[in-house]
């Protein structure tokens, strides 16, 4: 390698380092590292995030089941023979299982 090739290689390396530094700066790596230096802050943020996710799941599940039960009541009110019979059988099975559980206690 002659002097000129070494110089070009150094320029390319310098450009790559500058690009990497710019990308790291845009990614806020320093803030990320600073955030993880304080474990209490990490625990707090994780706890609040977990609460928010849990609350969202609870509300979403409640709304979904409310919609399903509402639709089932509409189906029962329509008195469709086949579907109403299936729902009646499911209700009967649940009631029998509840009675069985009560007798086991």
Image: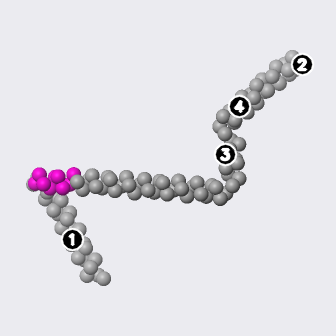
Q: Where is residue 86 in the image (x, y as percent from the top left)?
A: 16, 58
- Which is more N-terminal, label 3 or label 2? 2
Which tag is nearer the camera, tag 4 or tag 2?
4
Quarter of the picture holding the N terminus: top right
Instruction: Bin the neighbour count of mark 2 within 10 Å (Cα to Cα): few under 14, some 14-19, many 20 and up.
Output: few
Which colour style is shown? one colour
CA gap, disc 4 to disc 2?
28 Å
Q: Are marks 1 and 3 in contact (CB under 8 Å)?
A: no
- Which is more N-terminal, label 4 or label 3? 4
Q: Any magenta on residue 70?
A: no
Q: Name the residue under label 1.
A: 95
Q: Name the residue under label 4.
A: 22
- Which is more N-terminal, label 2 or label 1? 2
- Which is more N-terminal, label 1 or label 4? 4
Q: Residue furthest top?
A: 4
Q: Any magenta on residue 77?
A: yes
Which image quadrant is residue 22 in? top right
Residue interval drawn in magenta: 71-79
Instruction: Bin the neighbour count of mark 1 within 10 Å (Cα to Cα): few under 14, some 14-19, many 20 and up.
Output: few
Q: Closest to the observer: 60 or 95?
A: 60
Instruction: Bin the neighbour count of mark 4 within 10 Å (Cα to Cα): few under 14, some 14-19, many 20 and up.
Output: few
Tell me if residue 1 comes above or below residue 103 in the rendering. above
Secondary structure type for disc 2: helix
Which tag is nearer the camera, tag 1 or tag 2?
1
Q: Mark 2 points at which residue?
A: 3
In the image, what residue occupies the spot 67% across and 57% down?
Answer: 39
Q: Mark 3 points at which residue?
A: 32
């Amino acid at each position: 390698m002659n002097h000129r090739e070494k110089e070009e290689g150094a320029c390319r390396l310098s450009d790559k380092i500058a690009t990497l530094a710019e990308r790291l700066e845009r990614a806020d790596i320093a803030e990320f590292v600073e955030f993880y230096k304080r474990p209490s802050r990490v625990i707090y943020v994780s706890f609040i995030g977990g609460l928010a996710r849990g609350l969202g799941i609870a509300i979403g599940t409640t709304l979904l089941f409310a919609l399903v039960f509402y639709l089932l009541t509409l189906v029962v009110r329509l008195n469709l023979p086949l579907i109403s019979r299936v729902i009646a059988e499911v209700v009967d099975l649940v009631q029998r299982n509840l009675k069985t559980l009560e007798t086991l206690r």
